[in-house]
Amino acid sequence: MDLRYLCTTIGNLSGIPIRLFAGETLQFFYSMVHLPKDPMTPWAKEILSITAHAGYYVTPQFHYYGVVNTGDAKLVVGPARQIAESEQALRELAFRLDLSGEEAEALTAGMRGIVRMPVESVLQMLCTMNYVLNGEKLELKDISIYAQEQAALAVRQGQRQAQQRFSGTPPEAVSYGEHNTYDLEQQLLGMVRKGDTAALQVWFASAPAIHSGVVAHEPLRQRKNLFIISVTLASRAAVQGGMQVDDAFTLSDSYIQQCELMQSPERITNLQYRMLLDYTERVERLRRGKTPSRLVLAVENYVQHHIGEVIQAEAIARALYISRPHLSKRFKEETGESLTDFVLREKIEEAKRLLRYSDKSLTAIGAYLGFSSPSHFSRVFKKYAGISPRAYRERLP
């Protein structure tokens, strides 16, 4: 079978990029839009590890990649997305791909030119490709979960509950005294909601033993299930603390995906601590003062969403439907800091994180954060951090 011809035809019909691999080696790439670098690159390892005849992978930015395996060949279609990405999300993708300037603009234009498609349509495409290549008839329910599966689950759950009633150990006989999670849960969620990282770290240092319910019959699955419960509750607490819903839920999805890949209870425990601290730190960055107003929270969320752009007070005021003088005056009155200082300080805090946790050059980081030149970035960094960005990175442990 002429797999390259098949890829080209599918790419033309769907309007979505498609690739042909032999093992992990790219043999052919086709896209109707210009992409200076393949957007799947940061997640290539996870995508290429899919071995089922038909499967898919979802990135933290909710880009879908469909995979069909046939013999030694692997066809990968994507990225697909139903809802257009934000400008900030595309800038972050370009940053991950080490693109800047004209190449970053070209990537943004190319990504916006990819045909929008819901995940159900991507899965239907995979079923069709799988039938052509492997002669195997799959339905959507074979790749994802649909109403039929939900009905089957309802039957099994009903049977389980009926069995419990007549097994001699009814639910009423279970000792609820073994559970101590509620009060501890409320303590933790309160810290997340308030953005109180200092209290959370103290709590970690002397955390009591937690007796949770049994939610799986296998220890590793038990840990993973409890992690999913924890991150779900933490994301809701963060929303109550001022974090935007989409941000909180996207972060939750990312942590769950990381957890599912882990095979060690100890690593899951460490990830859980990191997750709780991450949410709390993010809320802390948003909450300036104990009871920030809706206006201050709105400004802080705007800055976080546009951290990679040149942020002007006029643009913030326009987004919040108020005048620029009124915005600047209210923000200064409520926080004690000018809007310009706040924006630049937030950019420098993000620069510190990138200097610590990425291997990007100072020039790339400065450009990503919207500074006009390396010297401008260095000058502003030194003003707010008291040290040059180069010296800051060199002093990191």
Image (cartoon, helix red, strand yellow):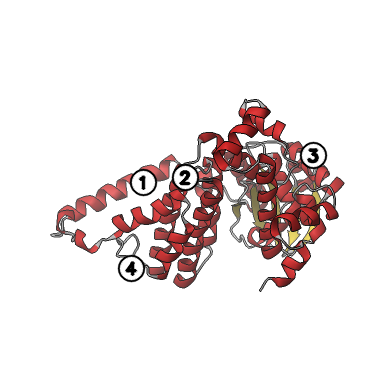
Residue 198 at x, y = what percent?
47, 60
Residue for badge 1: 152
Pointer 1: residues within 10 angstroms few (<14), some, or many (20+)?
few
Q: What is the C-alpha distance between the residues marked 1 and 2?
A: 38 Å
- For the residues carrying marks 4 and 3, which lies nearer the camera in this image? 4
Residue for badge 2: 241
Q: What is the C-alpha distance between the residues marked 1 and 3?
A: 44 Å
Q: In this view, does 141 lie to the left or right of 172?
A: right
For marks 1 and 3, the one nearer the N-term is 3
For marks 2 and 3, the one nearer the N-term is 3
- For the residues carrying marks 1 and 3, which lies nearer the camera in this image? 3
Q: Dot 4 lies on which element?
A: loop
Q: Which mark is residue 109?
A: 3
Callout 1 touching callout 4 (CB < 8 Å): no
Viewer-proximal residue, 380 or 363?
380
Q: What is the C-alpha distance between the residues marked 4 and 2?
A: 25 Å
For marks 4 and 3, the one nearer the N-term is 3
Pointer 3: residues within 10 angstroms few (<14), some, or many (20+)?
some
Callout 2 touching callout 3 (CB < 8 Å): no
Pointer 4: residues within 10 angstroms few (<14), some, or many (20+)?
few
- For the residues carrying marks 2 and 3, which lies nearer the camera in this image? 2
Residue for badge 4: 208
Q: In the rendered image of this protein, does residue 251 appear above or below residue 117?
A: below
Q: Residue at x 66, y 59 (%)?
A: 353
Q: What is the C-alpha distance between the residues marked 1 and 4?
A: 39 Å
Which amino acid type corresponds to the residue marked 1 in the rendered image?
A: Ala
Q: Which residue is drawn at 59% across and 43% down?
A: 336
- For the residues carrying marks 1 and 4, which lies nearer the camera in this image? 4
Callout 1 touching callout 3 (CB < 8 Å): no
